Amino acid sequence: MINPSLACTMRAALLVLLLTTQGVSASAQTSSMTPDQVAMQHVIEDFLQSRSSALPGQVSIETGKFPEAGRYASCQQWQAFLPAGSRVWGRISVGLRCTSGGNFSFYVSARVRVEGSYLVAARPIANGQVIEAGDVKRIRGELTAQAPDLLLNEADAIGQTARSMIAADRPLQTMLLRPVNVIQAGQTVKVVAQGGSFSVSNRGTALSAASSGQAVRVRLGNGSIVTGVAREKGFVEIPN
């Protein structure tokens, strides 16, 4: 049977060995880069830092492997760029093109992590429930690991309606919520048409539900149907 104190000593020695080995590996990886590759890495990191400065959280950047620098040694100046349609978020490819001393370019893999706070359900939320302040809470985590329509601000959630049941602690997304309807189908509404110096109002019946800012069709008393924009409860505006 192994002596407990001896087992503890062995575990401590193994931990030190593992940490030392990891440190040597990381150091070896850094030292294995040529000055040209280090320069390329700095160009990409500076580029991504500038592009990510407005992101909502703490940004960290990792770059992948760089090609052998021999064939690129003639380049005196590099310029970083992103493929069309790319955003500085998560796993991406970053381009490097030589702008002085050569005419070549290539891509390097990179990862942009953003650590910040976002909204989750503080408790179960029922289908059709209007979200109130007590229904949401903030937690911290990696934003880039969440869905792209993740909600970061309480104002984007409070007052919205749940499209379906939302479990407690689930990250809140735009797709899970919809605006509260200010007009219901069959409701009697006031319809207002405004011109440069005049305003005409009428009453009618809404043919569908609509939230503020959405288009809604209204049947007027004479049977004609007009399309307007829902502005507030019971009020529809006809654009000029």
Image (cartoon, helix red, strand yellow):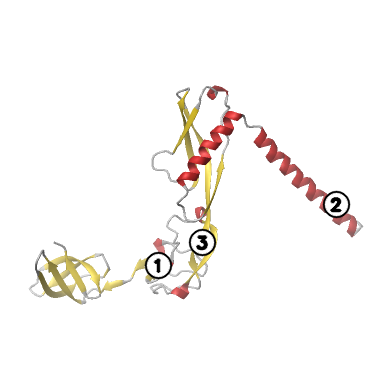
The residue carrying mark 3 is 117
Identify the residue at horizontal 66%, vertical 32% (top origin). 32
Mark closer to the chain start, 2 or 1: 2
Identify the residue at horizontal 90%, vertical 55% (top origin). 6
Amino acid bearing label 3? Ser
Judge by depth and name the residue closer to the eye, 223 or 26.
26
- The residue sitting at the left extreme is 222
- In this view, the mark in front (2 or 1): 1
Identify the residue at horizontal 39%, vertical 65% (top origin). 156
Amino acid bearing label 2? Met
Reply above or below: 219 against 49: below
Image-based side of 223 in relation to 145, left or right:
left
For mark 3, give the secondary structure.
strand
Identify the residue at horizontal 79%, vertical 48% (top origin). 16
Q: Quadrant of residue 201?
A: bottom left
The residue carrying mark 1 is 155
Amino acid bearing label 1? Ala
Q: How many labels does the image show?
A: 3
For mark 2, give the secondary structure.
helix
Mark closer to the chain start, 2 or 3: 2
The residue carrying mark 2 is 10
